[in-house]
Image (tube, rainbow, N blue to C red):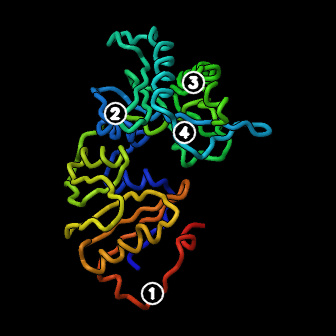
Amino acid sequence: MGQIKTLDQTLEALLCDQYAVPLVGDYPMAAIAAVADGLDIAKAYWLRADPVHLRLQRDCFSLDEAVPLPLLSVHAEQMLESLNQHFALDLNTDSGEPEYQFFIGTSGAWYLRCQQHPSITTTLPSVAAGKNSHQFLPQGKGSAKLIGLLNEVQMLLHEHPDNLAREAQGIEAVNSIWLSGGGFLPQLNGSINPELLMSNSAFYKGLALWANTPYQALPENMDVILTNRAVRMQLVSCEDLDAHWFKPILVALCAKKITQLTLNLGFYDQSLSVNIKPLDQYRFWRKAKPVQHYLP
């Protein structure tokens, strides 16, 4: 059903390619998301700084798959306040502002603002999850400085009162941050994509703002009447994904409420890109296959 491609890239990278977001070291996902997350990005370089738990294995630390770790807003604010107090004296000589400053967006996402390009490339957490985290630390000319920052962050978080409170409740501590998606907000080049983006993700919303394309928060279910247009969706994981999302989407396609559906599915460092039009429903000679068939 439809056109299906298996790609050796993350879901986020696939979306950036589909929207012609320029790759300059990293895809500038943090800056794009920060716009939608209520932050004043100015002309600074932005990184995602997700709160994470690094788990001690026999001879290394591995990145737990829960990225970012869920946090009470009061804990997140107090942790970042401590980090910002620590780095407040490291001032940029040109701006007089702290070289590194942490922010929380309206979505609860954490960001790191750098006054200048740190000369690094990063790895998305979906690639590093469950693996030796050392192999996926920032790379490049400025990596030593950023890795030093990470070491300082880890020491500050180790005995932080909010982490001690989490551990006392049997909840995993935030013992590090994961930097990714760095860059300056790019200029928009080329034509505008007219499709509707539906998601609850700050990155998707920021991408829609950047590309000047329609955006809508993801509804609780697909009973919402869709206009006759192309739709790109980021679905929320749930226990019954098929009944909750896929079957209603199929009904909307058959009823031609959706003229074209682009469905991107991520699996660690791989993605599926599926493009479906109403006419594809009538290609009955194509045998349906499970998603796992397309992911090695």
Residue marked by disc 2: 184
Of mark 1 and mark 2, the one earlier in the sequence is 2
From what the image shows, is residue 6 above or below residue 198? below
Of mark 3 and mark 4, the one earlier in the sequence is 4
Q: Residues within 10 Å of mark 4 (few under 14, many from 20)?
A: some
Image quadrant where one finds the N terminus: bottom left
Front-most of residues 68 and 207? 68
Of mark 3 and mark 2, the one earlier in the sequence is 3
Q: Residues within 10 Å of mark 3 (few under 14, many from 20)?
A: many
Of mark 1 and mark 3, the one earlier in the sequence is 3
Q: Gap in Å between the C-alphas at discs 1 and 3?
A: 55 Å
Q: Gap in Å between the C-alphas at discs 1 and 2?
A: 44 Å
Residue marked by disc 1: 286
Identified by mark 1, the residue type is Arg
Identified by mark 3, the residue type is Asp
Q: Residues within 10 Å of mark 1 (few under 14, many from 20)?
A: few
Q: Gap in Å between the C-alphas at discs 4 and 1?
A: 41 Å
Front-most of residues 49 and 43? 49
From what the image shows, is residue 244 above or below residue 114? below
